[in-house]
């Protein structure tokens, strides 16, 4: 019976780069930046049309 906590010797952990940037940190920064921009935009729209 295998220990479920430890990966098997043949299993490889893949750490591939993201599809279009150099690192995952850059991709996460873009996603968070977009979220902030959308929040500010929706807040402005709400204030402008209320």
Image: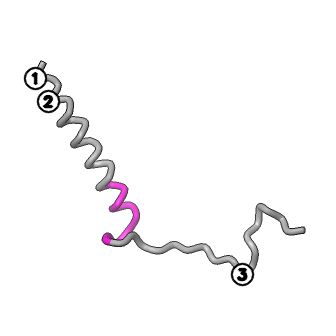
Which quadrant holds the N terminus?
bottom right
Identify the residue at image location x=40%, y=64%. Answer: 24
Report the span colored magenta.
20-29
Residue 47: x and y, percent?
Answer: 14, 23
Identify the residue at image location x=25%, y=36%. Answer: 39
Count residues near mark 2 (Cα–Cα under 10 Å), then give few for <14, some for 14-19, many for 20+.
few
Is the Cβ of the residue at disc 3 closer than 8 Å to that at disc 1?
Answer: no
Q: Is residue 20 left or right of residue 40?
A: right
Give how far apart the Cα atoms at labels 1 and 2 are.
6 Å
48, above or below 19, in the image = above
Q: Which mark is residue 45?
A: 2
Element type at mark 1: loop
Q: Which mark is residue 49?
A: 1
Which quadrant holds the C terminus?
top left
Element type at mark 3: loop
Is the Cβ of the residue at disc 1 closer than 8 Å to that at disc 2?
Answer: yes
Count residues near mark 1 (Cα–Cα under 10 Å), then give few for <14, some for 14-19, many for 20+.
few
Count residues near mark 3 (Cα–Cα under 10 Å), then give few for <14, some for 14-19, many for 20+.
few
Residue 21: x and y, percent?
Answer: 32, 70
- The quadrant in which residue 35 appears is top left
């Amino acid at each position: 019976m295998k220990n479920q906590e430890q990966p098997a010797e043949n299993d490889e952990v893949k750490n591939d780069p993201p599809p279009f940037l150099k690192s995952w940190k850059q991709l996460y920064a873009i996603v968070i930046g977009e979220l902030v921009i959308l929040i500010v935009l929706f807040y402005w729209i709400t204030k402008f049309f209320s």
